[in-house]
Amino acid sequence: MMEDFVKRQLDREIEMLSYNQLTELGNRAVALGLILGHGYRGGKYEILMRDRDLLLSPEEAQPYLEQLLKQNGG
């Protein structure tokens, strides 16, 4: 019982860290003018750009934003 509880707590904390990191990356990209907005929509992560909108899994969105920032000095 206690082991299941600890595992669920750890899973939630990992999920929250991932969510916070993705939000931080998105906010940096907005601040640099690389994207117009970002956020969760229907279980996916939406990235709003001038010429298109992307709907990615959080696991796909994180490296996408990291690469975008890296390419543009962010």
Image: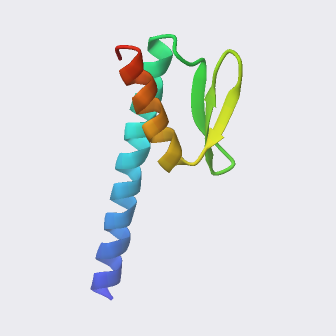
* Res 27 quadrant in image: top left
Q: Identify the residue at horizontal 41%, vertical 55% (top origin).
A: 15
Q: Toward which corner of the image does residue 36 lie, by quadrant?
A: top right
Q: Residue at x 45, y 13 (%)?
A: 31
Q: Is residue 73 left or right of residue 31?
A: left
Residue at image coords 58%, 35%: 39
Q: Position of residue 5 (x, y in %)?
A: 34, 77
Relative horizontal placement of residue 31, taking residue 41 as reference (left or right): left
In percent of width and height, residue 64 lies at 48, 35
Figure quadrant of the C terminus: top left
Is residue 15 shown left or right of residue 54? Answer: left
Give the total number of marks visible in the rendering: 0
Q: Position of residue 38 (x, y in %)?
A: 58, 29
Can you name the residue that lies furthest to the front here?
71
The residue lying toward the viewer, choosing from 51 and 29, is 51
Q: Position of residue 58 (x, y in %)?
A: 52, 47
Please state which of residues 4 and 42 is positioned toward the viewer in this rendering.
42
Looking at this view, is 23 or 2 the one in front? 23
The quarter of the rendered structure image containing the N terminus is bottom left
Residue visible at 38% across and 71% down in the picture: 8
Q: Image quarter for residue 70?
A: top left
Q: Is residue 41 above or below residue 28?
A: below
Is 7 positioned to the left or the right of 36 in the image?
left
